[in-house]
Amino acid sequence: MRRPDLGRMLDPDSKHLLASQIAGSCQLAIVVGDGLSPSAVNGHAIELVRRLIARLAVDRLEIGHAVVASGARVALGDEIGAMLGARMVAVLIGERPGLSAPDSLGAYLTFAPQVGRTDAERNCVSNIHGAGLGYDEAASRIAWLIREGLARELTGVTLKDESGGAAPARIANVQRGGETGI
């Protein structure tokens, strides 16, 4: 808590351990971090990941690596994703305990993770908890953002969450093999 900058980078031992596990690049890495609310991760991460795996399977997207990190902040996913050669990283993290939701989970998605990415280069699905966004809806939104982020090769302010409605005609056309540009 006193040194949030330390939660944005791996310590030397963790970096060495992670480097020893690398077996090539992957499409997606998931980082589960306690962030500011370990109770959010303990209460919601497993069930969200279960539902997310099912949604990703529909699009034949697999989680290449999963990492659990303590003392984590969102930006830690950038270093982990870059080390693992992930095209995209999803960081599931406990959000700031608030007035009404001390166990809120957030999911932050970053295409082409690398140290130094900004929040403007991420998409966020937040407020995942019992009285907030449910697991099914959260998993659907996250899966949509992952699929579209990988297809368009971007995340952040240039990728709007359109998961609730039909895909715009231009995107749908690309998915059917028509137009090649977005």
Image: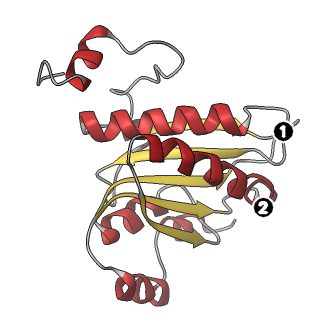
In the displayed image of the protein, which residue is found farthest to the right? 100
Question: Where does residue 177 sit, x and y in percent of width and height?
Answer: 16, 25
Q: Is residue 20 above or below residue 140?
A: below
Coloring basis for residues: secondary structure
Q: Are discs 2 and 1 less than 8 Å apart at CB?
A: no
| Amino acid type, label 2 | Asn
| Residue topped by disc 1 | 130
- Residue 122 placement, left or right of 45: left
Q: Is residue 115 above or below residue 122?
A: below
User: How many neighbours does mark 2 have within 10 angstroms: few (below 14), some (14-19), or many (20 or more)?
Assistant: some
- Residue 132 placement, left or right of 63: right
| Residue topped by disc 2 | 42
Question: Where does residue 45 sit, x and y in percent of width and height?
Answer: 69, 55
Residue under the image location 62 percent in, 53 percent down = 49
| Amino acid type, label 1 | Gly
Label annotation for residue 154? none
Residue 36 can be seen, yes or no: no
In the displayed image of the protein, which residue is found farthest to the top? 169
Q: Is residue 176 above or below residue 26?
A: above
- Residue 50 placement, left or right of 42: left
Q: Quadrant of the C terminus?
A: top left
